[in-house]
Amino acid sequence: MRTILVLNPKGGSGKTTLATNIASYFSIKNKKVTLADCDPQASSQDWLNLRSDKQSSIYKAVLTQSNLKVSKDTDILIMDTPAGVTDKRLIKFLSQAQTMIMPVIASPIDIRAAEHFIEKLFSLKTTINHKIKIATVANRVREDTLIAAKLEYYLDKLKLPDGKRLPFVTMLRQSQNYIHAAERGLSIFELPPSKTYYDREQWEPLLRWLDSTRSQPNN
């Protein structure tokens, strides 16, 4: 089972939007997908409850006493994490995953919070043992703004402790399509392509990365 972690301790970064759309993408590809909502706000679970039986199946992970119960035949587990993750929970999340996606929105506060979190993340490098593959996504971006350009520049220059570049895979715009999809338990991949062409185009680099060996640890 492959586990993809969507994580940023800063609230409002759009983790649920990423998690639900990634889950939908893989379910459409006929993978058995389980979506784990680890956030007390339960936004991902609400999305699943809105989902029609006519759509591709996405299963729920049952959370009991901070432990996840996931079907053994799950191909891909997507974990939507809460804000304000403690060091202990952070280590637990990281130890369970092969891939981590960190969404960052374009605001000075969020960029500074991302800097602090990445420092903390890299301080745990001996704990996670470099096995997890991490990438960043600029999320909810208002295009052609100065702060969007600043965020893009910042994420593009991020490096790992060993000097290698931390992958910055794509920039996703702030779009009403995500709201319209979420209201119906859908993803943008389940809305008409004519209405979501540009959004799908922005997702392509992230999907290619997730489908590639670059997003998974070497065995």
Image (cartoon, rainbow, N blue to C red):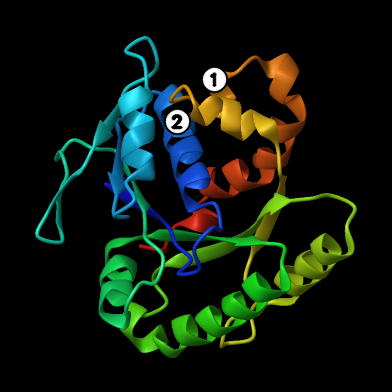
The image position of residue 191, as x and y in percent, is: 59, 18
Q: Residues within 10 Å of mark 2 (few under 14, many from 20)?
A: many
Of residues 92 and 9, the one drawn nearer to the viewer in this rendering? 9
Is residue 165 at all visible to an observer of this figure? Answer: no
Q: Residue reaching furthest top?
A: 54
SS at circle 1: helix
Residue at coordinates 67% horizontally, 39% vertically from top-left?
A: 204
In the rendered image, which quarter is residue 198 located in? Answer: top right
Q: Is residue 106 above or below residue 204?
A: below
SS at circle 2: helix
The image position of residue 199, as x and y in percent, is: 71, 34
In the rendered image, which quarter is residue 106 located in? Answer: bottom right
Decide which of tag 1 and tag 2 comes sooner along the chain.
2
What residue type is disc 1 on?
Glu
Q: Residues within 10 Å of mark 1 (few under 14, many from 20)?
A: some
The image position of residue 156, as x and y in percent, is: 75, 69
Is residue 148 at all visible to an observer of this figure? Answer: yes
What residue type is disc 2 on?
Ser
What residue would you read off at disc 1? Answer: 190
Q: Residue reaching furthest left?
A: 65
What residue would you read off at disc 2? Answer: 24
Residue at coordinates 32% horizontally, 78% vertically from top-left?
A: 86
Residue at coordinates 45% horizontally, 62% vertically from top-left?
A: 7
Residue at coordinates 39% horizontally, 32% vertically from top-left?
A: 47
Q: Is residue 53 above or below residue 173?
A: above
Q: Quote the CA–CA distance across marks 1 and 2.
A: 8 Å
